[in-house]
Image (cartoon, rainbow, N blue to C red):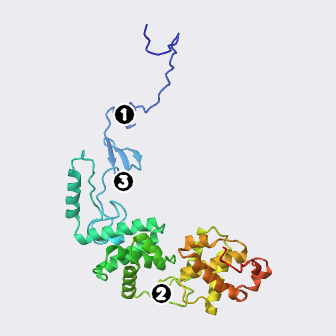
Amino acid sequence: MAYSQPFPLAQPLQKVQQPTYGPDLAVRLICPNCNDPNPNIIEEFSSGDLVCGSCGLVLGDRVVDTRSEWRTFANDEGDDPSRVGAASDPLMDGIEQLDTVISFRDGGSGIARELQRAASRGSASRSERNLLQAFRDISSWCDQFSLPKTISDIAKQLYKRSDEEKLLRGKPLDAVIAACIFIACRQAHVPRTFREICNLTHVSKKVLGQCYKALEQAFNLTPGASADRNNSTPGVTGPEDLLVRYCNHLDLPPNVQPICSDIIVKARELGIADGRSPVSIAGGAIYFTCHLLGKVKSAREISSVAGVSEGTIKLVYRLYFNVKEKLVKEDWLKDGRAKLERLPMDTTSK
């Protein structure tokens, strides 16, 4: 004997049907004055009322108009972009911002790819396509670098101006974009070094420097646009501008960064480590401050974050160690935060 179930029950369970609830479609709106089973109800969208067409009695108010909107609220004649589509992008002024995307699902025949190529050629000119591609690259690289949208917008503005004025004709597109991102980081007071930009965009330092110098002269980027608020050398990122990011990557306490910044400023006044790169000074100052405060970090850890060699960090440390009495404030020693005895004499073992 075969059963539909592997282990059938002696008595099948009785399924209890749950009551279902739904709208009563038999309910109709009828005018109480006319009592006509087939009422003549008129929707007046201009006033938002439901009116009986026979006697004129108002049966309801505040009716929502679900029809299409054909009015324009622009100040002048023409299409009103605020009523249709997404928000307009000021960077795309003069360029058609509404496009058509063709799906790749063509069963592997390759027709969709050809249609996309034809649509891209017919929808925009070559300059517009290049501008859109540059904007996509800027957004992608800023996302890879974890940079905020403000920096991406500044870089796009710089690139659009340089493209309109033909400032960097003949330069590679990646180099121009890298220079725009470098300047945008300085203007937003979150500077990045040439080495970091080169590692991100795979552009040589020489070409990046040429593009940066050309944009700097064209846009008259004086020290106010380069984020070095405390520097004596215009146009160069100061080591104190890099401390916040390096200390965050090293998981150092919040009190390390301001003390390290004071040490760098004092060393600059004394002419110590002049001529060294900001990255080297920042790495050596962090190494000096960590030992001074008892928050020891090895030179290898600082080297991996700052991108300089351990020997360079220890060299800057030795320069600071020779004048440690002038760099360390008396207040730090009195309250016990800093102790000169913590500074090691021989750094080769670290």
Mark earlier in primary sequence (2, 3): 3
Please tell me whether mark 3 or mark 1 is closer to you in this view: 3
Residue 183, given in percent of the width and then of the height, sits at 43, 79
Q: Residues within 10 Å of mark 3 (few under 14, many from 20)?
A: few
| Residue that extends furthest to the bottom in the rendered view of this protein | 270
Q: Quadrant of the N terminus?
A: top left
Which class describes the residues within 10 Å of circle 2: few (<14), some (14-19), or many (20+)?
some
Q: Residue furthest top?
A: 1
**Marks 2 and 3 in Cβ contact (< 8 Å):** no
Residue at the spot of label 1: 35
Q: Is residue 252 visible?
A: yes
Q: Position of residue 289 (x, y in %)?
A: 67, 78
Q: Given the image, on which type of amino acid does mark 1 rest? A: Asn
Task: Kindly indicate whether the residue at mark 1 contacts the one at mark 3 (C-beta within 8 angstroms).
Answer: no
Q: Nearer the viewer, residue 105 or 250?
A: 250
Circle on res. 47: 3
Q: x, y (%) of residue 232? A: 55, 91
* Quadrant of the drawing holding the C terminus: bottom right
Q: Which residue is mark 2?
A: 235
Looking at the image, which residue is at 33% across and 70% down? Answer: 134
Could you say which disc has been placed on residue 168 in the image?
A: none
Residue type beneath disc 3? Ser
